[in-house]
Amino acid sequence: MEYFLTEEQKVIKDLARRIAEERILPVRAELDEKEEFPGAIMKDLADSDLFRICVPEEYDGLGGGCMELCLVVEELSRICSGVAVSYAATGLGASALLLYGSDEQKQKYLPDITSGKRLAAFALTESTAGSDAGNIKTTAEKTADGYVLNGTKQFITNGGEAEIYTVIALTDKKRGARGASAFLVEKDTPGFTFGKKEKKMGIRTSSTRELVFRNCEIPEENRISREGMGFIMTMKVLDRSRPAIGAQAVGIAQGALEATVDYAQERIQFGHPIITIPVVQNMLAEMATRVEAARLLVYAAARTIDSGAKDFTEEASMAKVFASDTAMKVTTDAVQIFGGAGYMRDYPVEKMMRDAKITQIYEGSNEVLRGTIAVGLRKRKARRE
Ligand SMILES: Cc1cc2nc3c(=O)[nH]c(=O)nc-3n(C[C@H](O)[C@H](O)[C@H](O)COP(=O)(O)OP(=O)(O)OC[C@H]3O[C@@H](n4cnc5c(N)ncnc54)[C@H](O)[C@@H]3O)c2cc1C
């Protein structure tokens, strides 16, 4: 398949693939088993300038966009999506800053993020606010010098490992979601601690943790944009990051497909490789077709975003929904073709099937996003009338 990548994009993709194969592949099973954060690999990615790709050149970045991010995430996920999400969460954590931050805030925080010296994270979810993100309870009360944060965020990727957190909190409780604002909070701020570290089904090398704020004082200059912009910002940030979740799913599915073709070629039953069995061939053909379709949808959504389009909610949602459902289906079929061996940890498809599941859940569950797509269809119909 021809993806019409630019020369720069091919270089970025090849670089990410090389790091994934040379540095992640030898340790992926161990990282998963030990549920250990891939700190050394984050350093490799930083040393290879991969944290710079989506940052404008004026802030020491490489000036790439969503497409470049998707290529890196896909290649890392082909080997280990736990590593990929640890990398991508920094982009998510820096996204509100990049889109809405002041020049002073960018000058202060972006150099450390682009160099990979400090990881970032994005904190929205709470026990009462998952899909219902507008129901957050964390408050940011105005004081003479700034704000005091109180509340608990849950399921935060890079929690404990990141040093810069974008936190969504209520500056006006009465206004609900319209009273939410975004803040940059540094790891060692007094009153900011880490709670429960989650033990997960998949992406186990990534850190998923509670953030606890108890009378945590932050200066006014750490608020991103105006008060009350937090929820709108969140929606824009997530619209931009959903193709990257799609890319994570495509990478997982691609890895599973390749492992399955190899296995089907080697596994002999009834005197022949199982790849000669028509039912297995049909399954492989279906898997390969779905992976290509998902990849093309993800690239199309990423390119739409990079074109400067103003509204891409539906494209981003479709890419995430279709690619994540593809990853779940393809990895499940991969385990099936491996038979009993696929159920064992000796082969990567067992991990890939566990890793695929989360892509259907986070950054907007697929059920919620199907609702978003349907709303878009109704709007388009209304415009036609
Ligand atoms: C490993 C992991 C990492 C995460 N990382 C982050 C992070 O870095 N930052 C962050 O802020 N959050 C993060 N999250 C949170 C994640 O985005 C939420 O888990 C997700 O949005 C779903 O919310 P929930 O878990 O509360 O499920 P719920 O909202 O309780 O949903 C439960 C079920 O109900 C369905 N449902 C709910 N509402 C609707 C509706 N309106 N229409 C149709 N179906 C509906 C859902 O689809 C789902 O099937 C992470 C979660 C996980 C598991």
Image (tube, rainbow, N blue to C red):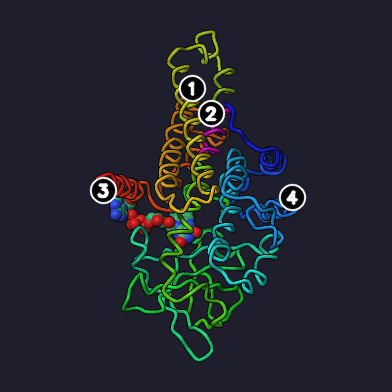
Circles 1, 2 touching at the beta carbon (< 8 Å): yes
Residue 267, given in percent of the width and then of the height, sits at 56, 18
At label 4, the amino acid type is Ser
Q: Is 312 in front, or is 262? A: 312
- Depth check: give the residue in front, 233 or 267: 233
Spatial CA distance of label 3 from label 2 is 42 Å
Element at badge 2? helix
- Amino acid tagged 3: Ala
Labelled pair 4, 1 in contact (Cβ < 8 Å): no
Q: Quick one: label 1 or label 3, which is nearer the N terminus?
A: 1
> How far, Cα to Cα, is label 1 from label 3?
41 Å
Q: Residue at x 67, y 72 (%)?
A: 108
How far is disc 4 from disc 1 in space, using C-alphas? 35 Å
What residue lies at 64% left-to-right and 50% top-to-bottom?
64
- Crowding around mark 4 (Cα neighbors within 10 Å: few <14, some 14 to 19, many 20+) is some
The residue identified by callout 3 is 382
Q: Which residue is mark 4?
A: 48
Please name the residue that numbered disc 1 is placed on: 284
| Contact check, label 4 and label 3, Cβ < 8 Å | no
Ligand 1's image quarter is: bottom left
State the CA–CA distance, disc 4 to disc 3: 48 Å
Q: Where does the image place residue 218, in percent across and percent down from the top left?
A: 54, 81
Pointer 1: residues within 10 angstroms few (<14), some, or many (20+)?
A: many
Amino acid under disc 1: Leu
- Say whether disc 4 or disc 3 marks the residue closer to the N-terminus: 4
Q: Amino acid at mark 2?
A: Leu
